[in-house]
Image (tube, rainbow, N blue to C red):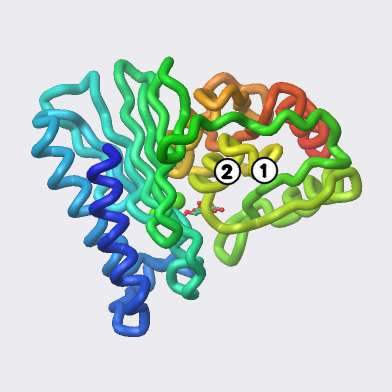
């Protein structure tokens, strides 16, 4: 998985440096899919199919590909942080998760611009190169920095997002909106952020990041109390205390 993410990421990086020559097509309002995005997905699909013939796929561009082996599925976002990529901001990632019998058992999130490869395997911890990752230990909101995602043109939920910010902003040391949910989760695992929340994400945005957080000793929850984060895409992550504090504030915002 790291080998494949590395290859796809290096390809993205070459295109990133050459961004003015990219052919970009418009899929919908503010929803760009670049040629680089598709090329990266192709590399991932080809390499993973070769390494594990028959495994199924769920990929952002290609969608669901049912293989002969239905108990294994790769969940892939070839480029998370498309808007950053297109705007020349070096904060984007390749995200690959492996699901076995419906459970995520491994994940890789790779930012090729910084050459940071975040990875985790169930029961084996989360790692950034040879450094074992651990979520931050802060227990008070006033010293915590959070990441979130905000809806943009063509999305719903603008008003509720403002309510959520209103609940959390005055109590925290800062909120960031960096533009890659996969990296937001990886950064929670690395202890850079104390917590992260976002609604309506897709499975490929969060599948890899979730296991990286959990293997770094962190906790994730479905914001509204549901039991399937991947289904609803509404996620909160952090250490146990931060996760609970965020859930409390987010439910107050919804209430
Ligand atoms: C997006 C990023 C972003 C999140 C959006 C996602 P994309 O993925 O993860 O942080 O706020 O909701 O769609 O489109 O760049 O792959
Ligand atoms: Ca994404
Ligand atoms: Ca994407």
Considering depth in this image, is 192 or 250 the residue closer to the camera?
A: 192
CA gap, disc 1 to disc 2? Answer: 6 Å
Q: Is residue 102 above or below residue 88?
A: above
Ligand 1 within 8 Å of the CB at mark 2: no
Q: Is residue 227 above or below residue 91?
A: above
Left or right: 72, with 80 as reference point: left
Residue at coordinates 48% horizontally, 38% vertically from top-left?
206
Which numbered circle lies on residue 193?
Answer: 1
Mark 1 lies on a secondary structure that is loop
Residue at coordinates 13% horizontally, 30% vertically from top-left?
52
Q: Position of residue 84 (x, y in %)?
A: 50, 66
- Assess disc 1: are there few (<14), some (14-19) or many (≥20) residues with their C-alpha within 10 Å of its C-alpha: many
Q: For the N terminus, which image quadrant?
A: top left
Q: Dots 1 and 2: beta carbons under 8 Å?
A: yes
Which numbered circle lies on residue 187?
Answer: 2
Q: Position of residue 213 (x, y in %)?
A: 54, 30
Left or right: 36, with 184 as reference point: left
Residue at coordinates 53% horizontally, 37% vertically from top-left?
233
Ligand 3 sits in which quadrant? bottom left
Ligand 1 within 8 Å of the CB at mark 1: no
């Amino acid at each position: 998985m790291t080998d494949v993410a590395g290859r796809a990421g290096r390809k993205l990086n070459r295109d990133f440096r050459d961004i003015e020559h990219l052919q970009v097509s418009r899929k919908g309002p503010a929803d760009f899919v670049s040629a680089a995005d598709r090329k990266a997905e192709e590399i991932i699909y080809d390499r993973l199919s070769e390494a594990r013939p028959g495994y199924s796929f769920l990929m952002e561009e290609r969608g669901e590909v049912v293989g002969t082996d239905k108990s294994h599925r790769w969940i892939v976002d070839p480029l998370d942080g498309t808007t950053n990529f297109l705007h020349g901001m070096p904060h984007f990632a390749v995200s690959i998760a492996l699901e076995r019998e419906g459970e995520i058992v491994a994940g890789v999130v790779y930012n090729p611009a910084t050459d940071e490869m975040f990875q985790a395997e169930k029961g084996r911890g989360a790692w950034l190169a040879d450094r074992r990752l651990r979520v931050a230990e802060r227990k008070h909101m006033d010293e915590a920095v959070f990441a979130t995602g905000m809806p943009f043109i063509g999305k719903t939920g603008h008003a509720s997002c403002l309510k959520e910010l209103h609940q959390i902003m005055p109590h925290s040391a800062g909120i960031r909106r960096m533009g890659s949910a996969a990296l937001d989760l990886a950064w929670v695992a690395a202890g850079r952020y104390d917590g992260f929340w976002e609604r309506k994400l897709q499975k490929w945005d969060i599948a890899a990041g979730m296991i990286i957080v959990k293997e770094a000793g962190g906790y994730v929850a479905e914001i509204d109390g549901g039991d399937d984060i991947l289904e609803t895409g509404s996620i909160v992550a952090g250490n146990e205390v931060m996760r609970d504090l965020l859930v409390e504030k987010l439910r107050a915002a919804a209430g």
